[in-house]
Amino acid sequence: MIKIIKGAILLMAVCSFFDFAYAAKDAVEIPGDFKLTAIAGGLAPGMKVSKVEIGAKGNCIYSEADPGNNAAGSFVEKGRFSLEEPAMRFIYETIISNNFFSLEKNYKAEGVLDGNFASLAITMDNKTHSVRTRNIRTDRFDNIMIAVNIVLPADKKIIYNEIIDL
């Protein structure tokens, strides 16, 4: 049943993306100060940790942490690419519809010491908000991360356990 629900969410997200791709030109503009940084990966040493930074014009930087020292938080740039306007609008509208700026700063499954984490830092309209999850499904947060992953190139995904089945 959960896989059916997850599949339905993914299908709705993909359909929404295509709706945005053909939306009228008078759609809501993305704020000029828009910036999104998404990071996700394993908590244990040696696990992959990935990061993507997306600017208002769709310019993206993809980086990965050194697998031998992923806890240090230093990343090595692995590529640059651009997202088209429909993809940017899809991400922006997903942020708005999931009320990102009202999410708590931390969500954590108690008692789980390893596993995965994900974090999002978003700036827009002169506001910045950061949210981090650890080993817990957080629907509104996960919906945004799924939207980001839908528009990213196949080799630049930001994946963690809670959305891996989607």
Image (cartoon, rainbow, N blue to C red):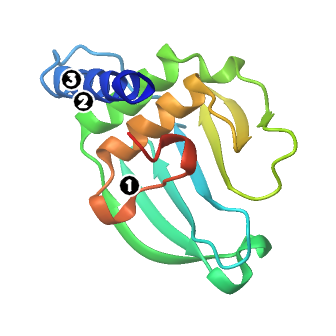
In-image side of 74 versus 7 (left or right): right
Coordinates of residue 91 in the picture (x, y in percent): 40, 32
Answer whether labels 2 and 3 touch (C-beta < 8 Å).
Answer: yes
- In primary-sequence order, the first of circles 1 and 2 is 2
> Which residue bears the numbered disc 3?
15
Q: Residue at x 41, y 42 (%)?
A: 148
> Which residue bears the numbered disc 1?
59
Please, what is the three-letter code of the amino acid marked with disc 3? Cys
Q: Which mark is residue 41?
A: none
Q: How far is mark 1 from mark 3, CA to CA? A: 24 Å
Q: Answer above or below: position of 99 versus 87.
A: above
Q: Answer above or below: position of 68 versus 86.
A: below
SS for dot 3: helix
Q: Answer above or below: position of 72 versus 25.
A: below
Q: How far is mark 1 from mark 2, CA to CA? A: 21 Å
Q: Residue at x 79, y 38 (%)?
A: 108
> Which residue bears the numbered disc 2?
14
Coordinates of residue 136 in the picture (x, y in percent): 68, 37
Coordinates of residue 89 in the picture (x, y in percent): 33, 29
